[in-house]
Image (cartoon, rainbow, N blue to C red):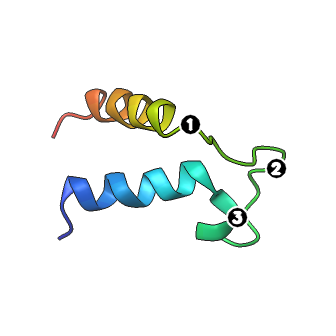
Amino acid sequence: MASCAHYAGKLDSFIAKPDDVVPGNNMKPYGGLASAEDRTKLIAFLQSLTTD
């Protein structure tokens, strides 16, 4: 099983540029979150919601 860090890296890539990670996704009009700092904060928030 992949580590949480692996998933965080994939999630960061998806949040930054969803079309690059999942071509043809239905996230329109969301085009990504450019700020690395904001993506880091969002991922930390999402991780705080997990029970693992």
Q: Which mark is residue 19?
A: 3
Residue assigned mark 1 = 35
User: What residue is shown at x 58% (from left), y 68% (from top)?
Assistant: 21
Q: Quadrant of residue 30?
A: top right
Kind of residue sitting beneath label 2: Lys
Q: Mark 1 or mark 3, which has the lower sequence index?
A: 3
Mark 3, residues whose alpha carbon is within 10 Å: few (<14), some, or many (≥20)?
A: some
Figure quadrant of the N terminus: bottom left
- x, y percentage for residue 10? 41, 61
User: What residue is shown at x 75% (from left), y 48% (from top)?
Assistant: 31
Mark 2, residues whose alpha carbon is within 10 Å: few (<14), some, or many (≥20)?
A: few
Q: Against 18, is 39 above or below?
A: above
Kind of residue sitting beneath label 1: Ser
At numbered mark 3, what does the secondary structure look like: helix, strand or loop?
helix
Q: Against 42, is 4 above or below?
A: below
Q: Which mark is residue 28?
A: 2
**What whole-number distance in Å separates the C-alpha atoms at marks 1 and 2?**
19 Å
At numbered mark 2, what does the secondary structure look like: helix, strand or loop?
loop
- x, y percentage for residue 27? 74, 51
Q: Quadrant of residue 35?
A: top right
